Each structure stands twice: as C-alpha cells, then as structure tokens.
Amino acid sequence: MTGSDPALFDLVNREWTSPFLDHFLPVFSSFDVWKPVMIVTAIGLVVFGKGKARQFLLCVAIGLLLGDVVIAQGLKQLVNRPRPRDVHVGTIVRSLSPEKPRILHVFDPPIVKEVEVVADPGKRGRSFPSSHALNVFMLATVALRFHRVIGLILVPAGLLVAWSRVYCGAHWPGDLPVSILLGVGVGVVACSIVSGLSQRFGWTGVGGVATLAETGPLAGSHQNHLRR
C-alpha cells in the first residue's frame, strides 16, 4: 500500500459521494447484475454469430483463463493485500439489494453502511489486483481488435467499474493502474494466441485477428510495406 492510498481512498469512498452515486456505481461493481447479459450475449454470438464472433469469444475465454484464473488469483495469493473494507477504519461499503436475481432489483434502495475491521481480513478475498478492472479492460482490448466502436464504449465503462470498486470499499486506488495494465496486456496476448491458431489451422470464414501492426498507428506503413 502506498502512503497516499488511504487518503485517496477516503476521498473517493467517504467524501466524493452522493445518493445518486450510491445507487449508480454498485450497478457497475456487481458481477451478478451483468452475468445474465454476458451469458445471453455469448449464447447469441455462438448461435447466430459467424467466424469472427466465435473467434472473439475464444479470445475472451483465453483472456479470462489467463487473466482471472492464473494471473489475478496468483497475484492475490502472492501479494496478500487485504481489502480496505476489512482493515481500514471508517470504510463505507455500498452494494445493491441482496434480493435475487440482482438484475431485477437494480432500482431497489442500495445498502450503504460503515463497516468494522475484521479479525481475518483474507477470509473475504484480497485486494490486489482487481479482477473486475483486469477483466473489463481485457474485454475492452479484445473488443477494440474486432469492433472498434464497441471497444471504445467499453473503455469508459471499464473506468467506471474501476472507480466503483474503490467507491464501494472493495479496493485501494493503488490496485487499479496495474490491474488495468494487466487487463490490456492479457487482451493483447489472448488475441495474439487466437491469431496464431487461426493462421496455423487455416480457419476459414474468420478472416483472422488483426495484429498490432495492422491496427496500430503504424498500420498504413505496414500495409505499404506489404504491397512492395
């Protein structure tokens, strides 16, 4: 934890607050709200999507396996950083109504309460890195390689998710920059893996995943070089 983390955390969690944010940001912080949307979207892409849609899903699946299961969980065990809601006096926890399914209760009054420190802070999860931030920026990076507009929409959505994790008391501000960079890196690696598989097995009707040279700022010079 950096020296400025508790002070910045208190600003976000206790000072920069409003009743609207108390209701709005927990929606972005709750995986249970978005899980049905993601499942329906994935099924729709599998059933109705063509090659690129399925390749997008493969990139996301690899990204989740590498980012969430391997990197995030491994770092959580290695760093063992407690969550602020477990060790920081005065932390305010915000969450949606516990009624399920959560997606049908997003307009219910949120739960806002100050919590006490706990004797076993690791029991309710560890703070670094933020799996939420890592996963959403992995998704945004993959989306940018397939559909730039959707990817550009996911980037500010990801920033809201990252902000919500501090606002709701689950993470320190210092957890987020590295988590975001890890998500971007995992997204690039996942796309590179699928691109390699596409070229290796000659998947047809897919068109391949664009490489960094084809989508980045040097795309024009790369294409000119190919024509020579």
Image: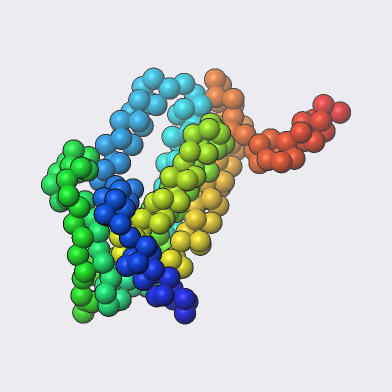
Question: Does residue 100 sit above or below 169 in this rendering?
Answer: above
Q: Is residue 7 above or below residue 185?
A: below
Total labels: the figure holds 0
Which residue is the extreme one toward the left? 99
Q: Residue at x 19, y 65 (%)?
A: 113
Q: Nearer the viewer, residue 175 or 69?
A: 175
Q: Nearer the viewer, residue 9 or 14?
A: 14
In the displayed structure image, the side of residue 135 where residue 217 appears, left or right: right
Residue 109 is left or right of residue 141, and the answer is: left
Residue 194 can be seen, yes or no? no
Give residue 124's quadrant in the image.
Answer: bottom left
104 displayed left or right of 64? left
Q: Residue at position x 47%, y 79% from top?
A: 3
Percent across and percent down for residue 37 are 30, 35
Quadrant of the rendered image containing residue 88: bottom left
Residue at image x 21%, y 79%?
A: 119
* The C terminus - image quarter: top right
Residue drawn at the location 46% of the way across and 21% of the way down: 50
Color scheme of the displayed model: rainbow
Residue extending furthest right?
228
- 24 versus 9 height, above or below: above
Left or right of 216 on screen, residue 181: left
In which quadrant will I find the N terminus? bottom left
In this view, the residue in front, 43 or 13, is: 13
Q: Where does residue 61 sit, x and y in percent of width and height?
A: 42, 41
One can see residue 27 in this view? yes
Q: Is residue 11 above or below residue 216?
A: below
In the rendering, at what x and y percent does residue 213 appear? 70, 39
How far from the left and from the top, in percent, is residue 142? Answer: 51, 40
